[in-house]
Image (tube, rainbow, N blue to C red):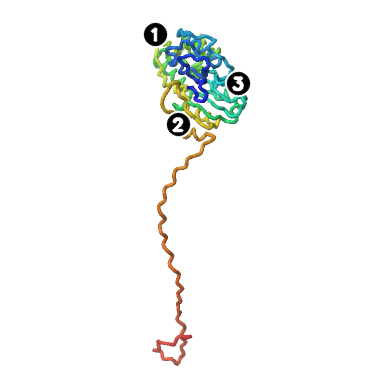
Amino acid sequence: MRQKEHPDLIFDAIPKLYESTTKVFLTNLSQVPEQLKPPPQKFCRMYTTRPLADQLLLHMQWKGANISEQDFHIVEDGKPFQLRLSDGRRLEAMLCAGTALGNSLVLLIRKLQGGKLLYFYSAVQQDDLCQVIANPVFHSWIAQGTELLYLNLSGAHRPLVHVEYDEVAAGIEKLCREKNCVVRLKLPHFGYEPLVRRLGHTLLYGHIRLIGQYANSYAALSNDLRRFEEPDYLVKVRIFASDDFTVLTTRSERFTLLPLDLLKWSPQPTRMNLIQLCSLLRPQHIQGIVPYHATGNVPPPPEYLQRFRASYSPQKPNAPLRGPAAALPQAAKKVDRVIRKRGFDFLSDDDDADTTDSEWMGE
């Protein structure tokens, strides 16, 4: 997506036309293969970290694209760097990894003099936010919040489903046992590496093999491949990249294919991930991420995220209109009543017993 206020800056989209002043920030590669069909004749300058640059170089060279190391501006994870825009203004930026493998980054941009961030951008799930929070420089940058927080809201309304990786691994092993053959997992070329790493720490340790281009791409993120290369372990799972699957499959090979939705995980941010970022940053404004060249209106963030905005003011429901006050009944006029009580009659023994009327006392 391109910034209106700073049109030189593009996030996670590679333009087809080359412009010398354009600066492309790559925080993940999940959507890049689709964007590069076909690839541009010349790439705009791409700012990213070494692991992502190596992944993209391998993939595009495999596809035969005209790309080289000179097309990248490599920055260090968690280290600020300066940007000079075409209008002469200068900004400061920083890319920080939100996963242990470093395949998912967050982008922070602010003015040179510091202060509140102009932008905080996070397009995919930050599977391990502790990776970011442990950086004291990151803390100093977010101390005053951010003016604009860009988030991928495509899964904001989905219910939260907790992923238990041991259960996922047990399901894969059960399928392997029931079918009595190797389970094949066909994954998108980029984005699912954190899941693969976590499965390698379950009971599938040593039983997973990364095949073809997926193995080369994963190795660009980590050289710790022991859990995928144990020679004495029975192979139960083979993982392929989706665009490499057909090439490496023979008709004689017996296998069962695991549907992707059974993994219960995707690079798309979960509700919990979105809440964590919003509560951490307390942004002035939250905006959904728009793909480059996309059209249409961006839906507003859900209310449960809006509550974390620094400028949030809950909208009170309109009070029901009250009709004209009913006339209150007038209080009855107080009337003092005089009650005359009958006096006592004094009778003597000489009075006639039949006498019923006596004189009133005091009359």
User: Which of 264 and 107 lies nearest the eye of the viewer?
Assistant: 107
In this rendering, the answer to whether 144 lies above or below 32 is: below
The label on residue 253 is: 1
107 left or right, relative to 16: right
Location of residue 231 in the rendering, given as x and y in whole percent from the top left corner: 51, 9
Which residue is drawn at the image coordinates 50% and 24% (left, top)?
3
Type of the residue with mark 1: Glu
Q: Earlier in the sequence, mark 1 or mark 3?
A: 3
In this rendering, the answer to whether 127 lies above or below 351 is: above
**Location of mark 2 (residue):** 300
The label on residue 80 is: 3
Secondary structure beneath label 3: loop
User: Which of 92 and 141 lies nearest the eye of the viewer?
Assistant: 92
Q: Looking at the image, can residue 254 be seen?
A: yes
Q: Tell me the distance, in whole angstroms, between the alpha carbons under discs 1 and 3.
A: 50 Å
Which residue is drawn at the image coordinates 49% and 34% (left, top)?
306
In this rendering, the answer to whether 190 lies above or below 295 is: above
